[in-house]
Image: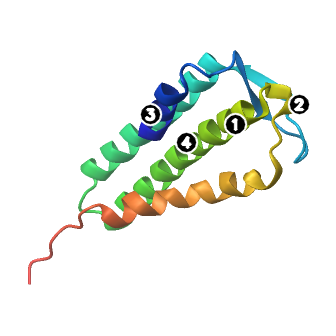
């Protein structure tokens, strides 16, 4: 969520009224969403995913598999949220208009963003075993 908020703050003066948000092909966007709605949506997804993942991880901290899966899923959803916002908004800013934003190979970043969930899964402290 931090990437979404920081980029929004940096781009605030340049943000268009709408952002390209749907591509049927790797070409130009064929649908757009109002920027404020798009921003709020992806911030919400990221915040809810983070809160749920952390809650499950804390509640089940002694169940390594449950904690790992919860953090993997919540981190992946947060990664997708950040990628959606950054790519769609960045491409729209670059193109100057939501309908001229071209997705191209950036679709691969969307797919790879799921792997962001590995980071919280790996850095979450594991319970200590008594020897």
Labelled pair 3, 1 in contact (Cβ < 8 Å): no
Residue at (77%, 27%) from the top-left corner?
96
Answer with left or right where residue 84 lies relative to residue 128. right
Q: Is the residue marked by circle 3 packed among few (<14), some (14-19), or many (20+) residues within 10 Å? A: few
User: Which one is in front, 16 or 32?
Assistant: 16
User: Which one is in front, 70 or 9?
Assistant: 9
Answer with left or right where residue 127 lies relative to residue 22. left
Q: How far across and how far down the image is residue 106, in percent?
A: 74, 52
Residue at numbered disc 2: 30
Residue at numbered disc 3: 6
Task: Reply above or below: 58 against 2.
Answer: below
Does residue 66 show up? Answer: no
User: Which one is in front, 83 or 94?
Assistant: 94
Residue at numbered disc 1: 88
Label whose residue precedes the other's in the sequence (1 or 4): 4
Label whose residue precedes the other's in the sequence (1 or 2): 2
Q: Which mark is residue 82?
A: 4
| Distance between mark 3 and mark 2 Cα atoms | 27 Å
Q: Quadrant of residue 33?
A: top right
| Distance between mark 1 and mark 4 Cα atoms | 10 Å
| Distance between mark 2 and mark 4 Cα atoms | 21 Å
Q: Quadrant of residue 68?
A: bottom left
Label whose residue precedes the other's in the sequence (3 or 4): 3
For the N terminus, give its image quadrant.
top left
Task: Reply above or below: 32 against 63.
Answer: above
Q: Is the residue marked by circle 1 packed among few (<14), some (14-19), or many (20+) residues within 10 Å? A: many
Labelled pair 3, 2 in contact (Cβ < 8 Å): no
Q: Secondary structure at mark 4?
A: helix
Q: How far across and how far down the image is residue 127, in percent?
A: 19, 67
Q: Secondary structure at mark 1?
A: helix
């Amino acid at each position: 969520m931090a990437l979404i908020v920081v980029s929004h703050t940096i781009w605030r003066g340049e943000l268009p009224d709408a952002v390209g948000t749907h591509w049927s092909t790797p070409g130009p966007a064929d649908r757009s969403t109002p920027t404020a709605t798009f921003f709020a949506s992806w911030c919400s997804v990221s915040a809810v995913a983070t809160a749920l993942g952390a809650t499950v991880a804390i509640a089940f901290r002694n169940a390594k598999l449950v904690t790992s899966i919860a953090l993997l899923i919540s981190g992946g959803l947060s990664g997708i949220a950040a990628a959606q916002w950054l790519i769609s908004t960045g491409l729209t800013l670059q193109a100057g208009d939501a309908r001229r934003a071209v997705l191209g190979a950036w679709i691969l970043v969307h797919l790879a963003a799921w792997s962001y969930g590995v980071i919280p899964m790996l850095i979450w402290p594991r319970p200590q075993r008594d020897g």
